[in-house]
Amino acid sequence: MSTTTRRLSRTVRIDAVCAGAVELARAAAREVAAEGEVGAYLGCETEGERVVTHYFAADHRGYLGWRWAVSVARAARAKAATVDEVVLLPGPEAITSPAWVPWSQRVQAGDLGPGDILPTAADDFRLVPGYLGPDDTGSADSLRVLNQEVGLGRVRVLSVEGRDDAAERWYTGPNGPEDPVAQAAPAACSTCAFLVPLAGPLGTVFGVCSNEFSPSDAQVVAFDHGCGAHSEIQAPTPASAEPTGLPSHVLDTLGYDDLEYQPRKSRRSGR
């Protein structure tokens, strides 16, 4: 048997004295827990050489599935175990809080409200420096001044990856061609007079809607998006009225007709 095998066998071997200290562990748990919160004995497991942890059910409505864990240890050649620690731990079926997630991964679109600040990471893949030259040289400040004079004063600008990421999000979103509103539209935004194209590479696919009656007003829309407020939709022509007079089916209750009265002849007189 190798040294590693002998070490593993010693690790899994449970100490009989520590394993038998159930009542010692129960008394230690009752000292920490409130009255009536230490339930049935659930078993034990070895934690190392002459170290055993005993488990008791936690009878508390707020800790369903939790258990009291009492670790006992025995010194070498000692005939009795002593209590090491008492803690309340979740069991396999315990109700626990979800794993902690950093705030940067929890923020979703639409979460930002008035007064909220969302920092941008220095290594954000969507952004690249907006000026040339390293920051640790004197030319960096002069380049910033020059960029501001020509309207390019932003420290960082959109990267190619950031532009592609935005384009994919817009195209597959509610203002893209697959939206139900676009599927039912009579024509595409590319032929609408209310479309204001964007500048730059994004202007080949996207524009901004300027129709206040459109559900996409003031929003970026794809050229092959569409809605029912297209500029070239014409209202149906109403039926024309009859050129003169009233139609035959209209009853005139205001006018009157002149009729010549002719008395009816009697059959007896022949007149």
Image (spheres, helix red, strand yellow):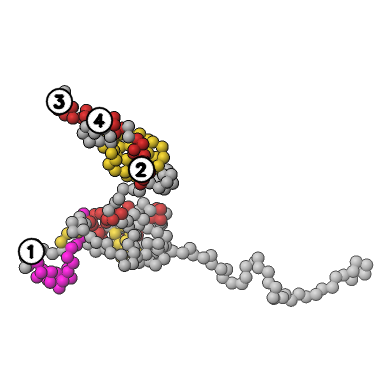
Specify the label residue 29 is tagged with. Answer: 2
In this view, which residue lies farthest toward the top? 1
Asked if the residues shown at circle 3 and circle 4 are in contact, with their CB atoms under 8 angstroms apart, the answer is: no
What residue type is disc 1 on? Asp
Q: Secondary structure at mark 3?
A: loop
Residue at 12% x, 72% y: name it: 145
Question: What is the secondary structure assignment of the residue under circle 4?
Answer: helix
Quadrant in which residue 246 is drawn? bottom right
User: What is the distance, in whole Å, between disc 3 and disc 4 at their CAs?
Assistant: 16 Å
Where residue 82 sits, quadrant-wise, is top left
Q: Which residue in the protein does label 1 denote?
A: 136
Magenta residues, as a range?
Answer: 139-161
Q: Mark 3: which amino acid?
A: Ser
Q: At label 4, which amino acid type do we have? A: Val
Query: Are the residues tagged 2 and 1 within 8 Å (C-beta)?
Result: no
Q: Earlier in the sequence, mark 3 or mark 1?
A: 3
Secondary element at tag 1: loop
Foreground disc of the pair 3, 1: 3
Relative vertical location of residue 3 with respect to residue 158 in this rendering, above or below? above
Name the residue located 51 percent from the left edge and 65 percent from the top edge.
238
- Label 3 belongs to which residue? 2
Number of the front mark, 4 or 2: 2
**Residue at numbered disc 4:** 12
For this rendering, which residue is in front, 110 or 243?
110
The amino acid type of the residue labelled 2 equals Ala
Quadrant where the image shows the C terminus: bottom right
**In whole angstroms, how far apart are the C-alphas of marks 2 and 1?**
62 Å
